Image (cartoon, grey):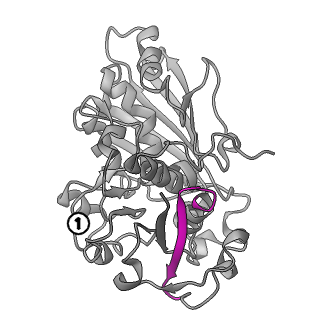
């Protein structure tokens, strides 16, 4: 069966990455692409790397244009998806790459986003643990999926095994992330200009203000942990793609080194797209460029009595578009890895 697809926000980074991956999906026909200010222009003008989609023209983003497809992807700024999802009730599968349907708590939404609160959809990170089972099970047959925030899913994947196994204490988590500017979208902003980011590293959303914090907390609670306390600091670095997240948490009293490593190995040992590296090895963002993989290394610091987890992802693939398509495959009963790769691009 071939599924017809519409992608909104197709002129942006997330929309472009969804299209890049879907272009090689044998079960998908990309029928419609939409945008706002760029409507009426050729897609290739804004996504010149998508040569196989040069025939497509960006249409206006309206419920009428998005309807009458088997699948709709919404790659819109936070707070803009809800106005369309409410009107797409007849579409069999809708996947939101924005934040509008990620959070279960209205209080958290009001505190970190504001505006109209929309109900949470099935969270699109198959490898996470939710109520003792992999989130993959909840995605089977899903009709509404919330793709993750890239920073949030990276930190959640890093820590959920330790929380679920009870080997780390979630009350004192510290995460520092080196992130590329593509995660901030394609809109022109002074702080994202090349002259502003080349040759420097810039912290942002410091002091507990980043919008992905409640998303991480939600994932850790779903894994079976107590309400976590997390110090979360992202740092913008001069690489177009990538996240390198370094997360630490205290070791629970009495837990052995072997139990710690087994907690992560038991969760990810049979996963394709989340891979635990051998002891003593740690990932680079270069190793995941273009791939749907999260590569992870663990260190046990007995002097500080903490576990350190270093995780690398491509924020546009496993962080966003790849996670969305992986979740789509599961929801439709297709092979989970279809149109996705574990191989990065080097050098």
Q: Which residue is drawn at 41% across and 19% down?
A: 263
Percent coordinates x, y for residue 316 in the rendering: 57, 56
* Residue where numbered disc 1 is placed: 118
Q: Quadrant of residue 98?
A: bottom left
**Residue at screen point 47% across, 35% down:** 247
Classed neighbour count for the residue bearing mark 1: other residues with Cα under 10 Å, few (<14), some (14–19), many (≥20): many
Query: What segment is highlighted magenta in the picture?
Result: 22-37
Instruction: Report the residue at 43% width, 83% height from top.
Output: 61
Residue 138 drawn above or below residue 41: above
Query: In the image, is residue 254 above or below residue 249?
Result: above
Of all residues, the one furthest to the front in this rendering is: 1
Residue furthest toward the right?
347
Q: Looking at this view, is 81 or 150 the one in front?
A: 81
Q: Quadrant of the C terminus?
A: top right
Image height of 193 relative to 163, above or below: below
Where is residue 296 drawn, in percent x and y?
56, 31
The foreground one among 93 and 130 is: 93
Total residue callouts: 1
- Residue 231 falls left or right of residue 302: left
Viewer-proximal residue among 67 and 220: 67
- Left or right of 58: which side holds 247? left
225 or 344: nearer the viewer: 344
Residue 190 part of the magenta-drawn span: no
Please state the horizontal and vertical placement of residue 227, each as a whole percent of the image: 23, 38
Position of residue 122 measured from the top left corner of the image (x, y, whole percent):
30, 51
For this orientation, the residue located farthest to the bottom is: 40
Q: Which residue is drawn at 55% across and 77% down?
A: 187
Badge 1 element:
loop
Decide if residue 90 is on the left or right side of residue 58.
Answer: left
């Amino acid at each position: 069966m071939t599924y017809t697809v519409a992608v909104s926000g197709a002129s942006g980074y997330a929309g472009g990455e969804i299209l890049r991956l879907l272009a090689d999906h044998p079960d998908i026909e990309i029928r419609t692409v939409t945008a706002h200010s760029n409507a009426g222009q050729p897609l290739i003008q804004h996504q010149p790397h998508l040569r196989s989609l040069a025939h497509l023209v960006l249409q206006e983003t309206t419920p009428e244009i998005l309807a009458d497809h088997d699948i709709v992807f919404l790659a819109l700024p936070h707070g803009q998806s809800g106005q369309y999802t409410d009107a797409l009730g007849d579409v069999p599968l809708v996947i939101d790459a924005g934040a509008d349907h990620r959070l279960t708590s209205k209080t958290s939404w009001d505190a970190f986003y504001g505006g109209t609160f929309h109900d949470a959809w099935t969270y699109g990170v198959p490898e996470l643990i939710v109520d003792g089972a992999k989130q993959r099970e909840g995605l089977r047959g899903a009709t509404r999926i919330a793709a993750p925030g890239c920073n949030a899913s990276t930190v959640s994947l890093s820590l959920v095994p330790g929380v679920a196994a009870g080997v780390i204490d979630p009350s004192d988590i510290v995460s520092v992330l080196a992130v590329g500017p593509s995660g901030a979208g394609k809109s022109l902003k002074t702080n994202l200009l090349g002259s502003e980011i080349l040759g420097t590293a810039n912290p942002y959303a410091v002091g507990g203000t980043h919008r992905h914090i409640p998303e991480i907390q939600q994932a850790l609670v779903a894994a079976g942990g107590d309400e976590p306390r997390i110090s979360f600091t992202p740092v913008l670095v001069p690489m177009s793609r990538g996240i390198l997240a370094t997360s630490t948490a205290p070791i629970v009293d009495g837990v052995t080194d072997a139990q710690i490593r087994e907690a992560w190995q038991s969760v990810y040992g049979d996963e394709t797209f989340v891979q635990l590296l051998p002891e003593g090895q740690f990932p680079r963002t270069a190793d995941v460029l273009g791939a749907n993989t999260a590569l992870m290394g663990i260190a046990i610091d007995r002097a500080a009595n903490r576990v350190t987890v270093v995780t690398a992802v491509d924020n546009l693939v496993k962080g966003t578009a790849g996670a969305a398509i992986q979740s789509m495959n599961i929801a439709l009963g297709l092979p989970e890895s279809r149109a996705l790769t574990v191989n990065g691009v080097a050098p």
